[in-house]
Structure formats: C-alpha cells, structure tokens
Image (cartoon, rainbow, N blue to C red):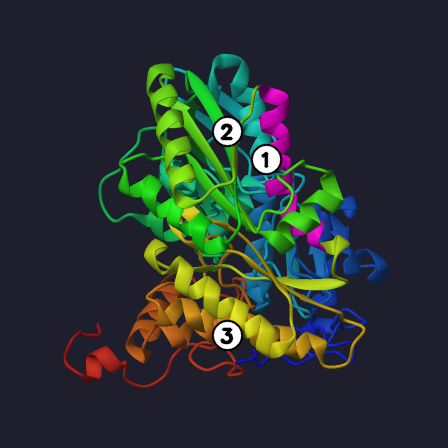
Amino acid sequence: MATTAPHTPEGRARTPGGPGARERTPAALAALVPRLREICGADGVLTDLSQRRVYESDGLTYHRSTPGVVVMPTTTDQVASVIRLCAEHGVPYVPRGAGTGLSAGALPHSEGVLLVTSRMRRILEIDLDNECAVVEPGVANLDITRAAAPHGYYYAPDPSSQQVCSVGGNVAENSGGAHCLKYGFTVNHVRGLEIVTPSGEIVELGGKAPGAHGYDLIGAFVGSEGTLGVATRITVSLTRAPEKTVTLLSAFTSLDAGGQAVSAIIAAGVLPSAIEMMDALAIEAAERAVACDYPAGAAAVLVVELDGPAVEVDAQLERVTALCADAGSFETRAASGAEERALIWKGRKSAFAAVGRISPAYIVQDGVVPRTALGEVLGRIAALSAESGIRVANVFHAGDGNLHPLVLFDDAEPGAGERAEEVSGAILDLCIEHGGSITGEHGVGVDKACKMPRMYDDASLETFDLFRRAFDPAGIANPEKLLPTPRLCGERPGVRTGVHPLVQSGEAEQF
C-alpha cells in the first residue's frame, strides 16, 4: 500500500523521475539561465543551491526534490515568456504559490524550472457593484477578506492556512476549508481566469459575469493542479457578511457520539456553515500548542458555526444545542463574543501544526467518505492504528465527510516512515471501499498519483490523460503529478502511442 516513490536514507521520499536532490543545475537548463534573467531580472532567478533548497518541498515535507532553477516573475508577460522558453526547449516547469499544499503538488522537478508566483500579490480590484474581486495568484487567501470586510463582504473559501496560502494555489488544488459545507469549494467562487497555457499563450476564461456559456473550462482548470497552465489573474465572488454568526463548542465522551450529533443536525434540516470534529489526540496537541480551553476529558469535540439572519441563527442555536445533548454531549457552550469565537477556531485551525508538539513527524492525509460512513471508517482507522503501533490523530470536516487523519511517527526510527506511509495508504483504501475519494481539498499531487488507479479504470485514466494533453501535448506542465505517469507509476511521461481503449471498443472515434 505504500507509494512507489524511492526514499532517502532518512526515509523521506524523492520525486519520481528526479533521482534525489540534484546538487548542480543540469547543463541544458543552465544554458537557459541568462535568458530567464533577461525575462525576470537578476533578482528573479535563483540558481544557488542553498537558495534552491528553500523550495525543495511544499507543506508535505515528506517528499523533497531540489528544483533545477527557481524563477519569480512579477507579471503575466514574464510568466508567458518563461513558459514559452520552457516549451521551446522541452524543459518541465512546476508552478508554486505559497508552498502550503499538502499533496506534494508543487514538488519541484530536479531538471526543471520552479515558477513561483509569490511576487504577484496585488489585489487589482474590489468591485462591489458586481460583488467580486480581481487578484493576482500570489495574494494570500485571507487578504481578500481583509480588503472586502470594510464594505461588508468576505471571501468564503477558507483553508486552515488561509493567512498564508495563495489564491493561485487554492485554484490549482480546488481548496476548501471549514465552511465548504454551506458555501462550497474554490471552484464555486471563481468567475474568471487569465491563464498562461503550457505553450505560453495568454488566454481569458470567463469574467466578472457568473455562469459563462459553453464548456466549463473554468471548472476544468480549477483543481487541475497546474497541469493545464498557470493562473495569472483570478476573478472571485465576494459574499455578503451574514447578519449574525454564532460558534458552538460541544464535547463528547466518544467519537461515535459526536458523529451521531452530526447526523442528527443534518437530518433535522439545519445547515451550519461549518461542522468540524477533533478527537482526543488532536485536542491534546491543540491544547499544548495554543491553550484553546476545550472541555477537559473530551474524547471528541464538535465546532459548529451557524450564520445568517439573526432570528434564524437564534432558532438554529437552540435546536443544535438540544441535538448535541440528545447525542450525549456532556458540555456545550456558545462563544460569548469575538474573542472566545476566535479561540475556539484557533484550536481547530492550529491542529495540523500543533501535532508537532506530540510527534517528531507526521503525514497529513485527505480522504472523503459519505457522512453516514464516518463512524465505521473512524473505527477502522483506530484499529489500523492499534495494529500498526502508529498513532493517528483525527481532525476533519465532519459535515461533508472530509477526513484529515494525521499519521504520527518518529522519523529518527528506522522504518517508521514506511509504516506510517502504509497506514496512510490504508486509510485512503478505506475511503475508496466506502464509496469515497482519495482527496477532498488537498489534491492528488505526487503523494497520491499512484492511488488514482484504485479509483478509476484504465479507460477513465486514458481519458483524463487525453484531456490533459490537449492543453499540454509535450508533457512539460507539472509532470508526474495528478495522474500516474501516465498510466503506471514509474513509467516516464510521454505522448500516448497506440489505439485508445475507447476507440478500440467502438465507444469513441479518433480524428
């Protein structure tokens, strides 16, 4: 069940196709450096090894690879020129935003260009008449809300890393967050895109008006993990701030009781803006890190947020409190003000980083199951943990069944990384077994590309690959991500040869 990525002596995975962190820039790539400096300026191109190593991983540090060259453009024209140069010479490139991704989707290619958009961070327009904002890809997610808040608006998608993660990265991974239950993922809030295709062409998709006609290319681009191009300008919807928001914390003596409360809330017809759950291990980590004052002795806590018209929120608060009590909650409290509300969320949103207080290393997993399967899957995860001796902390979006198990291990212990990876993979198998998915909001990246054949048959993967290569026939845009390369892990990417299975079966024609 472990991925096939080779490992370093320390147990960390190397990038497929990039045999270890290359110490020197390959000669073919080094020859492009003068032209890259003409495009991005001397300070926009990093070739020194110590500087390149800063970018050797995204937020999933288990996978590492030193980029051949790092470029940091500041304009769309510079992005287009860099990509045209890569296309001309057949050099792979990898787009990267803030580097907070958790699937190794921005893992660099050791013989390619890492295209970092962190210097493209201007909010170009807050258009209140059209309730939208136009931003560059390097803008931090939370900065849109900060700019819109004085006008009574906010940007709804809110990953836990929203203070630092970039909107461009959110678009690439179709990121979510705690409030996706009611407001949807990034794809539901993107109206328009300016993109640079893998051939270097600048293309406009959509605009300020929602609901463009024709094929939904925005829907296809959002979540494509950089394999269809790079977004250089993004138009997003702004959401009017609700009249009232209430955050509720409810504690239970078991995960199962917390899960029953979640089911009861949804079954009652209440749609909270968020329902989050944390187990005892995640609570312990959060308390150590940020002293969030969660109820002592809780085996599980629910964080429930309600928003909308004040009268409606008040009625829902009373209803949810009663449902939690019926499910066995031994303490339920609503935040009395902004400070207490922020403290409740601080515990939840710091959970990923907080487990560093209780474990030297960990893998963040991201699987989805139907909400009704939560109890069964959480029980199986506990059994996996007991059998393997690998601790698993659970913190997740209970309302939409999006699990984020944190698989803890000691990377100084020989073999611990491999055992943790096996447990991590087994959890994804559980998600598939129960009709779920291998990713909810973190993307596939390198980390889970080899899991794609567990979810999709050969014909589906071939169709995905045909679509990808309609944009990128040379296979230079973030190669070795999202799809197994292209059909079997370890196989080198390339243009497909032979007859497509759908053509062979008579289900499609090839022109």
Q: Is residue 152 left or right of residue 117?
A: left
Q: Are marks 2 and 1 in contact (CB under 8 Å)?
A: yes
Image point (53%, 18%), residue name? 149
Give whichever of discs 3 and 1 has the lower sequence position: 1
Q: Residues within 10 Å of mark 2 (few under 14, many from 20)?
A: many
| Amino acid bearing label 3 | Ala
Residue 12: mark in rendering: none
Which image quadrant is residue 309 in? Answer: top left
Q: Please, what secondary structure does the residue beneath circle 1 have?
A: helix
The residue identified by callout 2 is 247
Q: Which range of residues does the magenta coloring cover?
A: 337-355
Q: In the rendering, at what x and y percent does residue 130 appear? A: 36, 20
Q: Which residue is at a point 43% across and 71% down the rendered structure image?
A: 430
Which residue is labeled 3 in the image?
A: 426
Q: Does the magenta-highlighted stretch encompass residue 349?
A: yes
| Residue under the image location 27 percent in, 43 percent down | 267
Q: Does label 2 or label 1 sit earlier along the sequence?
A: 2
For badge 1, the amino acid type reads Trp
In the image, residue 404 lies at what x, y percent? 53, 56
Mark 3 Cα-neighbour bin, 10 Å: few <14, some 14–19, many ≥20: some
Which residue in the protein does label 1 denote? 345
Q: Is residue 97 visible?
A: yes
